[in-house]
Image (cartoon, rainbow, N blue to C red):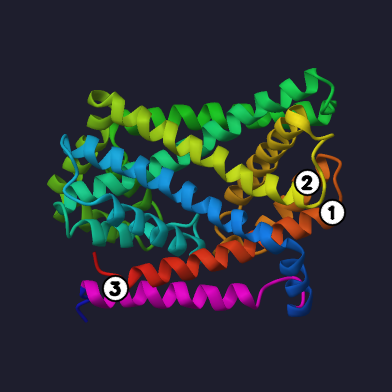
């Protein structure tokens, strides 16, 4: 059976819609309790959901910088189209297992309508790498935010906490080294080589590399070229991706303020509340990505929020509320992403 792009588009659309249904029926609370939580959020739902317009906008600008750096010229695709594919791609990522890789094939398929397939593939791979690379920087810098709060007496420091922080720092440093190797030498041929060591996939990997050897080398060359030649595009994309995590932290801050948690109010209190929100998002995303093979990270994100909020000395009930409202936001943005998939541009 030949899978046309339209059939693949319909398949991705079906997966996204199915994800919305599954997520609705996998809440750990009844629909009555869910509605009570939504009512409790009230008008705060507007900034909680709306802040993601900015987050996805920063993601889209980061991807646009990579596309233009990869092509060496202004991208022959409108920002609106990149923004739409960004939202839809992440909607599909929420719905799929193995670290949320469902959106990348869709992005490659759609972007190849605007540029050649090799540049489309390398641009999507580069953006996916940058997305994870920025995650590690977010976690790494968050460690030093925590240490700064320890110095001012706001956060505790014990042997256990110090050990965990040390492990996370080591984990990030190893990741930085791996990413630097990938950016310098390309990643596709190496990853396919690793896949070839998996039982039952060895033959497929060898045939695929044999049939597409030149194209794969070109893609790896384009990946290494961005890091080596267009440093402006590389660092622009990194800063934008990192900034999107900092903006995302406002979502949690809004929910803390909803519960009257403002650390005494005033400018100092608001800054402290925001930094606490950054730490909550950093710990939760680290926890969720370490166990990211679960579809939609069911139960993982919720547990991450409860643990991270409890670690700050706040109530578990607040952690449950934050996790539920974040899940509601995810469902709404998945639905928006699926609707945008059917918009032609």
Q: Earlier in the sequence, mark 3 or mark 2?
A: 3
Q: Quadrant of residue 324?
A: bottom right
- Residue 8 is situated, as x and y percent measured from the top left of the image, at 29, 73
Q: Main secondary structure of the magenta part?
A: helix
Residue under circle 2?
309
Residue 239 visible in the displayed image: yes
In the displayed structure image, the side of residue 68 where residue 337 appears, left or right: right
Residue at the spot 73% in from the left edge and 74% down from the top edge: 35
Residue at the spot 33% in from the left edge and 30% down from the top edge: 234
In the displayed structure image, the side of residue 237 where residue 303 appears, left or right: right
- Residue 249 is situated, as x and y percent measured from the top left of the image, at 62, 43
**Marks 3/2: CA–CA distance:** 40 Å
Residue at the spot 25% in from the left edge and 27% down from the top edge: 230
Give SS at disc 2: helix
Q: Earlier in the sequence, mark 1 or mark 3?
A: 3
In the image, the segment drawn in magenta is 5-30
Q: Quadrant of residue 331?
A: bottom right
Q: Earlier in the sequence, mark 2 or mark 1?
A: 2
Q: Quadrant of residue 130?
A: top left
Residue 199 visible in the displayed image: no
- Residue 28 is situated, as x and y percent measured from the top left of the image, at 75, 70
In the displayed structure image, the side of residue 199 where residue 112 appears, left or right: left
Give SS at disc 1: helix
Are the residues tagged 2 and 1 within 8 Å (C-beta)? yes
Instruction: Specify the label residue 8 is tagged with.
Output: 3
Residue at the spot 21% in from the left edge and 58% down from the top edge: 207
- Residue 138 is situated, as x and y percent measured from the top left of the image, at 56, 34
Residue under circle 1?
316
Is residue 61 one of those drawn in magenta?
no
Q: Nearer the viewer, mark 3 or mark 2?
A: 2
Q: Nearer the viewer, residue 78 or 276?
A: 78
């Amino acid at each position: 059976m030949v899978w046309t792009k339209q059939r693949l588009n319909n398949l991705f659309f079906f997966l996204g819609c199915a994800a919305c249904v599954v997520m609705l029926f996998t809440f750990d609370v009844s629909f009555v309790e869910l509605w009570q939580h939504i009512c409790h959020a009230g008008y705060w739902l507007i900034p909680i959901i709306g802040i993601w317009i900015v987050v996805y906008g920063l993601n889209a600008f980061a991807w646009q910088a990579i596309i233009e750096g990869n092509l060496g010229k202004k991208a022959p695709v409108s920002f609106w189209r990149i923004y739409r594919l960004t939202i839809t791609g992440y909607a599909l990522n929420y719905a799929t297992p193995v670290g949320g890789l469902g959106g990348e094939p869709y992005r490659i398929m759609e972007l190849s309508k605007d540029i050649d397939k090799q540049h489309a593939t390398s641009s999507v791979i580069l953006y996916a790498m940058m997305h994870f690379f920025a995650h590690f920087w977010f976690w790494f810098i968050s460690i030093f935010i925590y240490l700064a709060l320890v110095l001012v007496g706001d956060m505790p420091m014990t042997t256990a906490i110090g050990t965990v922080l040390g492990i996370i720092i080591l984990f990030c440093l190893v990741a930085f080294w791996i990413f630097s190797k990938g950016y310098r030498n390309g990643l596709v041929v190496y990853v396919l080589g690793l896949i070839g060591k998996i039982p039952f996939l060895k033959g497929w990997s060898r045939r695929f590399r044999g049939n597409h050897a030149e194209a794969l080398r070109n893609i790896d060359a384009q990946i290494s070229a961005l890091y080596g030649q267009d440093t402006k595009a590389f660092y622009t994309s990194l800063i934008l991706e990192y900034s999107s995590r900092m903006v995302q932290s406002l979502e949690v801050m809004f929910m803390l303020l909803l519960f009257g948690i403002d650390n005494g109010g005033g400018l100092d209190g608001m800054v402290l509340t925001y930094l606490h929100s950054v730490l909550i998002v950093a710990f939760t995303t680290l926890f969720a990505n370490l166990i990211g093979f679960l579809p939609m990270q069911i139960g993982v994100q919720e547990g991450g929020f409860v643990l991270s909020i409890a670690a700050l000395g706040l109530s578990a009930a607040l952690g449950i509320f934050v996790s539920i409202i974040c899940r509601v936001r995810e469902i709404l943005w998945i639905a928006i992403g699926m609707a945008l998939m059917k918009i032609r541009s």
